Amino acid sequence: MAAQLDGVLEKDLQEKIKNSKVLVVGAGGIGCEVLKNLVLTGFLDIEIIDLDTIDVSNLNRQFLFHKEHVGKSKAEVARDSALSFNPNAKIKAYHDSITSNNYGVNFFQQFTLVLNALDNRAARNHVNRMCLTSGIPLIESGTAGYSGQAELIKRGLTQCYECKPVPGQKSYPGCTIRNTPSEPIHCIVWAKHLFNQLFGESNDDEDVSPDTADPEAGAEVGEAALAKDANEKGNVDRISTRVWAKQCDFDAEKIYNKLFFEDIKYLLSMSNLWKNRVPPNPIKWDSIVEEGEEVTDAVARDQKVLTHSQSAKVFAESIKALKESFTKLPEGDYLVWDKDDKHAMDFVAACANIRAQIFGIPRKSRFEIKSMAGNIIPAIATTNAMTAGLVVMQAFGVLREQYEKCFHIYVRLVTNPRKQFIIRDKVLIPPNPKCYVCSAKPEVVLKVDTKNVTVRELRDDILIKALNMVSPDVTLDGTSTIVISSEEGETDCNDDKKLVDLNIVDGCVLKADDFLQNYELSITIVHKDPGREEAAFEIIADPSSLKPKEAEPSKETEKDEAQPSTSSGQNGSSTNGKKARYDEDVSGEVLVVPDDDDMPSTSKAGTSGSGAAGSSSSGSGVEKRKHVEDDEEPASKKVKVSAQQDDSDDDLIIMDD
Ligand SMILES: [Zn+2]
């Protein structure tokens, strides 16, 4: 093996490669390529971890897998395939989640370096923190379509994965989805929720019926509508959509009339909503005007924008088919929406278009709806391969200890004027001194509706989902109050309490601590009453960016100051029957590719967030993380150097096409 590398890699580096031990996190599109590259460049001691199993759809780009491997562990098959390139290598595979308690700081510290090949932000954030804590260099990578990148993250030297604010996650307030959609995506999100209400895992956050608590409708209006409704129809709206649908045996006409006629009429009765909006136009099943011919050709059906009557027909057909699959399931089981399931996709496309028509929103083809509903950015095998090559070249830089030359490298679809499509930064980006992860004293401000948000939401939606902790402990600063404990059962009695019930009010400071990540965060609470279009909480990563509070700011001004440039852009909301969260998933084999718009893409919720609580204090003996100030490059180096490369620059990797 080594003989083939002579003349390609210098002797010294070959030696270092042989003596290093690397961890590859993820055995998907990039991970397979990285593993192959490692084995072919002489790495002998490799560990690889991935919790996924191989799916047929992986086979077009994850070339260590073949048809006979479908259903098997990605990590294990990747190991076996890679070993065939170099049987002398030692590869250990873990079919597991990297966020599990089994992989604490001690685990990370055994490696020379860690290579990320992940497909989701949650796992990336976690590995980022583990590498910062352990002081192990991390090569982070990602692709989105034809764009890709690889970057070195080293404590104290470079920015960390969480130094940059998260690009705004698309989230849609509950009232917009339920009462006043104005864009096709609002109807698509609604249709996906409807699918779950009828056939999927039902979720209180995904209610599809009119939201009577919409603040803009005015309390009396909502109540009046409710009273009227109760008088006319008994309690029909108070039972769950699914129970009701089951009672009418999933009769397409009845379901249609309920959703697209009665519910819409109900919305119209909330007249405040329509003062400045075009009101919707309810359409009854038997008044649908036949238009357009029946579309039987599958391709045409995918590409054409169907008429209302065509959509209604597809609606009826798909309900019939879904009902059949659903009723075959054992009691308590449910369907999972999948864009590649014909009937599930037909259903969402039809419902979205019918609702769009009613609200005067442009309709879309099934194909367009599919890509919006599935957040699809295609994964391109060649981009993955190029990016994986860059990852291993960055690894060489680390082994040579030439950190100062390990600039962020990008793969681009569009070449620059010099016809280059692999481009790198000119400088290393130093850590952000205000980063709420890698700075000396991590802190954030949490603007939150303390009167309505519960402790459970604080833990699940804010600390775990938005701030990426695994199993946090939280205390109220200056008191002995334990708000949240990572010990199972210890603070269950707090779960349903509102923050205010535990005296967590405006001005309080919470201390949150995640033992596994060895991460402590100070959270200053600012109470806010969320406006209609706002989420119930907002995390501000840089507290100094907050303006001094004004007395009683109006809703408009609150909105204006809601997104300072340093805001993490994370949104969430109370599920208190008033507003719900509508996050779209982020990141396929993707991370932020500068210059490109924040692009949502497929996510497989890669890591199963909270590891088994209770045993959270395993990997003990953890040395306290050294913070930036301990290292040579002080955080005082405030220059925020532009990450964007200059096209006219000479210092580029030349790779003409
Ligand atoms: Zn950072």
Image (tube, grey):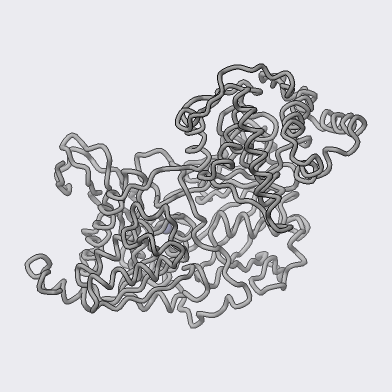
Residue 647: quarter of image: top left
* Residue at image location 63% in from the left, 76% down from the top: 614
Q: Residue 442, percent across and down?
A: 50, 61
Q: Residue 322, percent across and down?
A: 65, 44
Compare residues 382 and 126 and report the one nearer the observer.
Answer: 382
* Residue at image location 21% in from the left, 73% down from the top: 17
Q: Residue 526, percent across and down?
A: 65, 49
Compare residues 269 and 64 and report the one nearer the observer.
Answer: 64
- Outermost residue toward the bottom in this view: 621
Q: Residue 275, percent across and down?
A: 72, 19
Does residue 205 appear in the picture of this structure? yes
- Outermost residue toward the right in this view: 231
- Classify 595 as above or below 296: below
- Classify 484 as above or below 313: below
Q: In which quarter of the image is the C terminus?
A: top left
* Residue at image location 75% in from the left, 64% down from the top: 494
Quadrant of the displayed image that contains ligand 1: bottom left
Compare residues 94 and 131 and report the one nearer the observer.
Answer: 94
* Residue at image location 59% in from the left, 67% down from the top: 471
- Classify 298 as above or below 446: above
Does residue 157 appear in the picture of this structure? no
Compare residues 141 and 397 and report the one nearer the observer.
Answer: 141
Q: In which quarter of the image is the N terminus?
A: bottom left
